[in-house]
């Protein structure tokens, strides 16, 4: 069968190659690949920045934003042929730390976890794949065009869980949320904020294209003015940062109102040096009892939360997040950004 593969840490090695057909082991589902989403992580691996092939292999099958349809399932697995499923990305380490042993493998303490399509295990960008039934999540059949959005939705489901956990250290009834960045993570964070009944504001740098309309049609407000100015006006209870911009991250640290919670979800590149007033940021965080928390990855609980959120969302709105689709044999086109891209998808069928 065909799969999108890369030689980790080797720029220019991205290719669609022949790989062996998968065989399901005990307790595993055999799944026909439908599609995978492409994100910054995939592009960074393709650029040779990081990535780890499975032991004994020189190449890694990419793809962690999965969507597939069950071909075969064990009788006692809880799954049936034709079920629409997504595979969980992370696996706990073989000698689990305390967090991994309790199912909180997104919070692994020792870094010995593995990740499908990223670190030590092949991903889902192939015409067929297998997954342990315990690491598969069933989706509403109506999501067959957009189910690859589940993995990024789990990232923001966890982010919201973290915000609410931090806020609960005292009385916390947030009303206003500011999301910085209107990419897939930012838009999905806004979706979950709207589903919570909050007054949602989204900040991005563009004034035209599909993003402003997507935000407005969600029932949120769109802004393209400076973050510090907007934050002064809104005094948001919650800030969710999703731009990946070092400058925006620094401004976001002090962007919330009193007793605000800022959740950083983007991974910024290293090597860029900025001047900022650390004393002023520290003073504001301390005197206003603010909190800043980082959040990455997701566990099974967040996958189920994300699946429920997508099932409740407007399907036409979700479809509009997928702005470009390419077939597997032309998957390299998904790794070159185009104007107005939001979520780019590789179709595997």
Image (cartoon, rainbow, N blue to C red):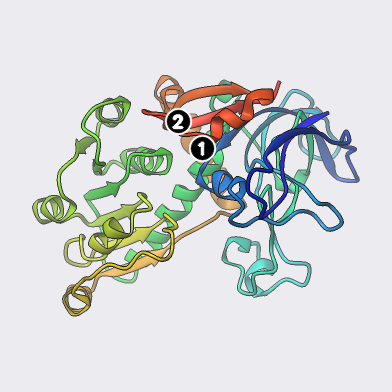
Reply above or below: 210 against 267. above
Q: Residue at x 63, y 48 (%)?
A: 11
Label 1 sits on a secondary structure element that is helix
Q: Is residue 164 left or right of residue 33?
A: left
Q: Quadrant of residue 323?
A: top left
Reply above or below: 259 against 340. below
- Mark 2 — residue? 312
Q: Residue at x 45, y 30 (%)?
A: 312
Question: Nearest the camera: 272 or 94?
Answer: 272
Q: Residue at x 41, y 23 (%)?
A: 320
Q: Quadrant of residue 37?
A: top right
Whole-percent x, y for residue 178 in the image: 25, 49
Q: Quadrant of the C terminus?
A: top right
Query: What mark, if any, has residue 308 been given in the picture?
Result: 1
Q: Are marks 1 and 2 in contact (CB under 8 Å)?
A: yes
Whole-percent x, y for residue 162 in the image: 42, 60
Q: Quadrant of residue 333?
A: top right
């Amino acid at each position: 069968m065909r799969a999108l593969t890369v030689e980790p840490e080797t720029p220019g090695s991205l290719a669609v190659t022949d790989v062996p057909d998968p065989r399901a082991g005990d307790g595993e589902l055999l799944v026909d690949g439908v599609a995978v989403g492409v994100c910054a992580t995939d592009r960074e691996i393709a650029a040779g920045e990081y990535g780890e092939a499975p032991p004994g292999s020189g190449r890694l099958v990419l793809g962690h934003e999965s969507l597939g349809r069950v071909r075969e399932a064990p009788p006692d697995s809880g799954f049936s042929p034709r079920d629409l499923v997504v595979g969980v990305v992370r696996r706990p380490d073989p000698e689990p730390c305390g967090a991994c042993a309790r199912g909180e493998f997104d919070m692994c303490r020792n870094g010995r976890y593995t990740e499908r399509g990223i670190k030590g295990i092949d991903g889902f960008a192939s015409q067929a794949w297998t997954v342990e039934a315990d690491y598969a999540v069933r989706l509403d059949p109506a999501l067959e065009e957009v189910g690859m959005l589940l993995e990024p939705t789990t990232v923001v489901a966890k982010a919201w869980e973290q915000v609410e956990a931090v806020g609960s250290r005292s009385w916390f009834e947030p009303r206003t949320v500011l999301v910085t960045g209107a990419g897939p993570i930012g838009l999905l964070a806004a979706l979950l904020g709207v589903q919570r009944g909050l007054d949602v504001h989204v900040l991005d740098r563009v004034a035209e294209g599909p993003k402003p309309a997507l935000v407005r049609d969600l029932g949120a407000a769109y802004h393209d003015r400076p973050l510090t100015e907007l934050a002064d006006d809104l005094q948001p209870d919650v800030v969710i940062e999703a731009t990946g911009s070092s400058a925006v991250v620094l401004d976001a640290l002090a962007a919330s109102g009193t007793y605000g919670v800022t959740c950083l979800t983007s991974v910024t590149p290293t090597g860029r040096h900025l001047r900022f007033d650390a004393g002023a940021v520290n003073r504001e965080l301390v005197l206003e009892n603010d909190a800043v928390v980082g959040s990455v990855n997701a566990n099974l609980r967040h996958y189920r939360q994300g699946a429920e959120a997508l099932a409740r969302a407007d399907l036409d709105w979700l479809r509009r997040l997928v702005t470009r689709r390419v077939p597997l044999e032309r998957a390299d086109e998904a790794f070159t950004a185009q104007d107005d891209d939001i979520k780019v998808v590789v179709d595997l069928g």
